[in-house]
Image (cartoon, helix red, strand yellow):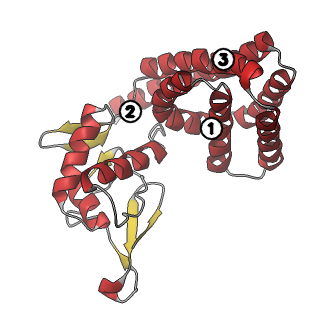
Amino acid sequence: MVYHTTNAKGLTLIQGGAANNGSPRKWGAGKRGERMAGVTLKPIGASFMLKDHIYEVLLEAILSANIYDEDANLRLDERTMAEQLGISRTPVREALARLERDGFVDIQPRKGVFIRRKSLDDVLEMVVAWAALESMAARLATQNATDVELERLRALAVHDSKNATHANIEEYSEANIRFHQAILEMSHCSLLKDMADGLFMHMHAIRRRAMGEGDRVDRSVIDHMEIIEALESRDADLAERLVREHTMRLHDHIRRTWRKIAVMSRTRRAAG
């Protein structure tokens, strides 16, 4: 069985089992000592199609990484990942090729594999698209959501609001994402949710970074409660508007703040 730990900059897996009498074996950074992106790989089960399973493991790790952090290390090392997972390099190589086709990594000959980060303009466009999809989901939810679903959403928001000041950013970021996913599910429109899920894979990392900036946690708690009240009152126009405005505030924050960070980063690189 494979267990994992991680830190902010690198990836480490601990492997234990019969092969070493249950004593954990810690894999390092690989024979070449390369630094690798801060992603987390989950255990490999016994029954699976190896090629597909490795793809899912790597994709989940990439989506869980804070790739939009200013100092994020985006490099992935094929040898290191194969060693940490306890498999040959061939299925890892195949999974990386598929991830490149799907737009999640760049494979650069003689340089390596790098997690693909969206440009600022791409990020802003994705947020606009998300605002359109989720606001429509909120409108539909006022018509289609059951009372039980609305009660669960309120319970989730109340729980998260109580813990918002004490939870770390990672914990609240995950709670925030669950809230927005719940609204999409309550629309009871499978096509709308499928479209949003495609965006969500990229929005996950974007929301994680943005949530830790400024007063966005406090603002998020207030917005969520207002959205719930609109949903509970079955006010389609209000619910749609509040969700759209909530997401577009994220858009405005990213456009204002991330652009400054991008300029500062370019200036530092030029000076260094």
Identified by mark 3, the residue type is Ser
Q: Position of residue 48 (x, y in %)?
A: 32, 58
Q: Residue furthest left?
A: 110
Task: Give the total of numbered labels.
Answer: 3
- Residue position marked by numbered label 2 in the rendering: 117
Q: Residue at x 77, y 52 (%)?
A: 166
Q: What residue type is disc 2 on?
A: Arg
Residue receiving disc 1: 177
Q: Is residue 44 above or below residue 104?
A: below
Discs 1/2, front: 1
Label 1, label 2: how far apart the Cα atoms are: 20 Å
Q: Earlier in the sequence, mark 1 or mark 2?
A: 2
Residue bearing the label numbered 3: 135
Asked where in the image residue 187 lies, by quadrant, the reply is: top right
Q: Position of residue 218 (x, y in %)?
A: 78, 35
254 versus 38 height, above or below: above
